[in-house]
Amino acid sequence: MVARTPLPPGSALLAIALGLAALIAASYASVPMYPVPMTLQTLAVLLVGALAGPRLGAAIALVWLALALMGAPVLSGGKAGLAALTGGTAGFLLSFPLAAYLAGLLPAWRGAGGFARLMAAFLLLHGLILLAGWGRLSLMIGAEAAFTAGVGPFLPGAAVKSALAALILILLRTRTGIAAPGREA
C-alpha cells in the first residue's frame, strides 16, 4: 500500500494546468502523416501520469480529451470535436487516460528503478497505446494497413520517447529530489 501524502492547497490545480499545458504543447509538436500524425503526445501523457500519479494523471488526460470534445483545438494540428475523437486516431487518444494511470503506478519510478526498468515499462505503455490505436484504425482500413500506417512508423519513436521519459524521471529524482507521488525521494 502506498502512503498518501496530502497535496498542498492548490497543487492539484497547478498539476492539472501544467499537465494540460504539456499535453497541448506535445500535440502541436507534430509531423503531419496520414492517417496518424507523429507527435510528442505519448511522451507527455506518460510523464504526466508518472509525475502526477495514477488518478490525477488519468484525470488530466480526461480533461484534455473533454476540452477536445468541446471544440478546443488541443489535439495535433489544432483538431478538435467529436470527429477528431472518433476518427483514425481515436484508439490512440482514448487510451491516454489508462496509459497515464498505469504510468502513475510504475514501481520502477516509485522505488529503486534504474534506466532499463523505466524504459522497459514505458515501452510496454507505448505498446498499449499503439495496440489501442491499431485496433481502432484496423476497423477503418484493415489490420495490415493499420499496422503499416499506424504502428510500424511509430515503433522507433516509441523507443526514443520511452528512453527520454526514463531519463527525465531519473534526472528529476536524482537532481531535484522530486519523487513519485506519495513517496519520499
Image (cartoon, grey):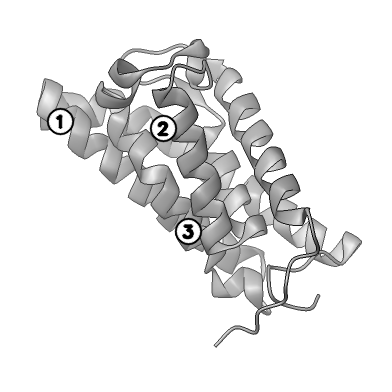
Residue under label 2, please give it: 154
125 w.r.t. 24: above or below: below
Q: Is residue 61 visible?
A: yes
How far is disc 3 from disc 2 in space, using C-alphas? 22 Å
Q: Earlier in the sequence, mark 2 or mark 1?
A: 1
Residue at x-position 70% and y-position 54%: 12
**Splitting the image into 4 quarters, where does residue 44 fall?**
top right
Q: Amino acid at mark 3?
A: Tyr
Q: Which mark is residue 101?
A: 3
Q: Residue at x 60, y 72 (%)?
A: 108
The mark lying in front, picked from 3 and 1, is: 3
Does residue 160 show up?
no
Residue nearest the viewer, comparing 105 with 115:
105
Q: Which percent across, then down, holds residue 50?
A: 61, 58
Disc nearer the start of the sequence (3/2): 3
Relative image position of residue 78 (x, y in whole percent): 51, 12
